[in-house]
Image (cartoon, helix red, strand yellow):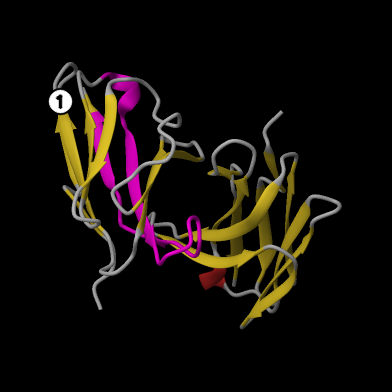
Amino acid sequence: GAGVSQSPSNKVTEKGKDVELRCDPISGHTALYWYRQSLGQGLEFLIYFQGNSAPDKSGLPSDRFSAERTGGSVSTLTIQRTQQEDSAVYLCASSLGLAFGEQFFGPGTRLTVL
Amino acid sequence: KNEVEQSPQNLTAQEGEFITINCSYSVGISALHWLQQHPGGGIVSLFMLSSGKKKHGRLIATINIQEKHSSLHITASHPRDSAVYICAVISQGGSEKLVFGKGTKLTVNP
């Protein structure tokens, strides 16, 4: 079956522009996660959804970041007024049922802010 | 000090060698993950464990909750095992979140 998909795979934008990143989880997976990996850095947890709800948004780096999930499926991560320090690979993962259970990762979106 | 520490940071081995990667954490956890990130960037979940030991093929993961320590072992290592291995803990206290180690870069030479 299909795995987790993310779009776009690459995004180059200018500083100050808004970007929207999309994640399609594995069908039936109720939990969805967003992570960020900056160049040469480790993974950073951003937010997770159980169904359409995000129990804790404190992992989002700033109020320029927001995420939503509709219909218990697709999720979008929006970054407003992008800054150069937002450049990173944004990874999405999903898991079946249990929060933070075995996760299946998407290929990531590489965001470059010029 | 990071909540999750991995050692070594880099590891080079010859094909066939037994590999051990260590992970220590300082927070209360409900479980721990071991992940593998391939050179191309793709991430695969290897293990999720909350006690004892798990084995899958040539990979073995152990965890000691009292000592707040986990190890990932690779037996009969192969060049295709070359990757970054990442330890991540599901931290408790307030809301749950996943806290990552910085990873161990493993290179297995033929």
Disc 1 target residue: A18
- Residue at (44, 62) in percent of width and height: A103
User: B32 or A73: nearer the eye?
Assistant: A73
First to last magenta residue range:
A83-112
Location of residue A49 with respect to A1 vertically, above or below = above
Query: Is A99 included in the stretch rendered in magenta?
Result: yes
Residue A81 makes an appearance in the image: yes
**Mark 1, other Cα within 10 Å: few <14 / some 14–19 / many ≥20:** some
- Residue at (39, 54) in percent of width and height: B41
x and y, in percent, of residue B65 in the image: 80, 56
User: B92 or A77: nearer the eye?
Assistant: B92
Q: Quadrant of residue A113?
A: top left
Residue B17 makes an appearance in the image: no
x and y, in percent, of residue B22 in the image: 74, 54
Query: Is A84 included in the stretch rendered in magenta?
Result: yes
Taking the image as shown, residue B26 lies to the left or right of residue A96, namely right
- Residue at (25, 56) in percent of width and height: A72
User: B39 or B99: nearer the eye?
Assistant: B99
Q: Amino acid at mark 1?
A: Asp
* Chain ID, mark 1: A
Name the quarter where the N terminus of chain B is drawn: top right
